[in-house]
């Protein structure tokens, strides 16, 4: 492993970190990209947590608002599970 | 084969546990009236303040001074320009209001300017939220309640408080993506469709004369200004003209806002 060829775990950690920090500091599409990338490549338990934090932090809280990030992240991580097990077998 | 199955089962087990946990936390938050989100927002405010201080100290230390100075100069000039535009827009809004008041024979005693509000720092960027919201560093303990109007220094309404914690509050933009608000341009009643970042658009009959920088007010917000006409696009083939409304102040550079009490 080198800095030019990081391991899968390093990439996952970096993506998750960017996702978590992006919730507070980056435009909303940064965590979204991290969620998609993590869901496509890894069985990432971080994904629903990023979705939950996004919605807890930014949902207006007045009336009923659909928690799009939470629902989307859960759906994505489970929809991608068969794809991952089919194409990304270790 | 069996090992791969076990591995996948173990990995998906973690995802299943995380899914169950987040759903439980979300439901718990809903049933406890937002206790988890209020704590999280409080933490976000602290993190934001720390990072702001760290950035300030890095800038003041002289590292990246050339680029930083240029950026700072650019930012201050842009803010200065926005302030002038906002003042011009505010002046137009006041002038239009003055004309309307003069036209009235009987005037009900309103005390719009006597309302005592709270000035609060904006602690998050409007770009960060996918729902057209932003956080301010004042909450229920500072006298802020749901429904309070949030104004710029020039008196333009930028949003409404939709949720309050002890020392934080969430503000939903008036021109949040997908939001719509009934407004008035001159004498024309319109429905402005928000597109985020302090911008909105509306369709107005082509016969009406509308000019750039004309103030846009919202009757439901006490006839306060919510923006100015930024540009107009009309075509001879259409009976309507597209009016693009914008806030005269850059929402991204807003550092402080003024919150009016709900009684107003």
Image (spheres, rainbow, N blue to C red):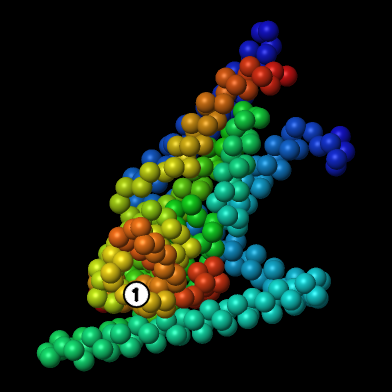
Q: Residue at x 28, y 71 (%)?
A: B208
Q: Residue at x 24, y 75 (%)?
A: B187
Which type of secondary structure does the marked residue at label 1 adopt? loop
* Above or below, B109 relative to B39: below
Name the chain letter of the residue that bears numbered label 1: B
* Above or below, B179 relative to B74: above
x, y percent for residue B247? 44, 72
x, y percent for residue B147? 31, 65
x, y percent for residue B22? 48, 38
Total numbered badges shown on the rendered structure: 1
Q: Which residue is mark 1?
A: B210
Q: Quadrant of the N terminus of chain A?
A: top right
Relative side of B185 to B135, left or right = left
Relative side of B25 to A15, left or right = left
Q: Residue at x 46, y 49 (%)?
A: A56
Q: Farthest top residue?
A: B1
Q: Residue at x 54, y 59 (%)?
A: B127
Q: Is residue B236 visible?
A: yes
Q: Quadrant of residue A60?
A: bottom left
Relative side of A5 to B102, left or right = right
x, y percent for residue B31? 33, 45
* Above or below, B19 relative to B178: above
């Amino acid at each position: 492993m080198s800095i030019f060829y990081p391991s899968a775990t390093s990439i996952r950690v970096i993506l998750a970190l960017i996702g978590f920090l992006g919730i507070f500091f980056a435009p909303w599409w940064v965590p979204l990209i991290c969620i998609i990338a993590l869901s496509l490549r890894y069985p990432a338990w971080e994904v629903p947590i990023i979705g939950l934090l996004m919605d807890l932090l930014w949902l207006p809280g007045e009336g009923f608002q659909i928690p799009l990030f939470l629902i989307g992240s859960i759906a994505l991580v489970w929809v991608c599970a068969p794809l991952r097990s089919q194409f990304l077998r270790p | 084969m069996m090992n791969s199955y076990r591995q996948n089962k173990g990995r998906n087990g973690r995802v299943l546990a995380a899914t169950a946990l987040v759903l439980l936390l979300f439901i718990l938050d809903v049933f406890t009236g937002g206790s988890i989100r209020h704590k999280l927002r409080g933490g976000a405010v602290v993190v934001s303040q720390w990072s702001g201080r760290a950035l300030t100290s890095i800038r003041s230390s002289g590292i990246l001074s050339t680029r930083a100075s240029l950026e700072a100069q650019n930012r201050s000039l842009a803010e200065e320009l926005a302030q002038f535009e906002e003042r011009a827009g505010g002046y137009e809004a006041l002038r239009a209001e003055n004309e309307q008041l003069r036209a009235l024979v009987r005037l009900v005693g309103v005390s719009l300017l006597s309302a005592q509000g709270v000035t609060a720092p904006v602690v998050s960027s409007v770009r960060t939220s996918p729902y057209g919201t932003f956080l301010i560093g004042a909450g229920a303990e500072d006298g802020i309640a749901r429904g309070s109007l949030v104004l710029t220094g020039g008196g333009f309404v930028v949003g409404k408080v939709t949720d309050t914690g002890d020392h934080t509050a969430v503000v939903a933009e008036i021109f949040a993506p997908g939001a719509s608000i009934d407004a008035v341009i001159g004498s024309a009643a319109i429905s402005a469709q928000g597109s985020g970042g302090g911008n909105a658009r509306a369709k107005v009959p082509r016969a009406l004369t509308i000019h750039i920088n004309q103030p846009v007010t919202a009757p439901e917000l006490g006839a306060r200004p919510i923006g100015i006409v930024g540009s107009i696009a009309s075509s001879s083939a259409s009976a309507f003209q597209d009016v693009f409304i914008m806030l005269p102040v850059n929402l991204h550079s807003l550092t402080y806002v003024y919150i009016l009490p709900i009684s107003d």
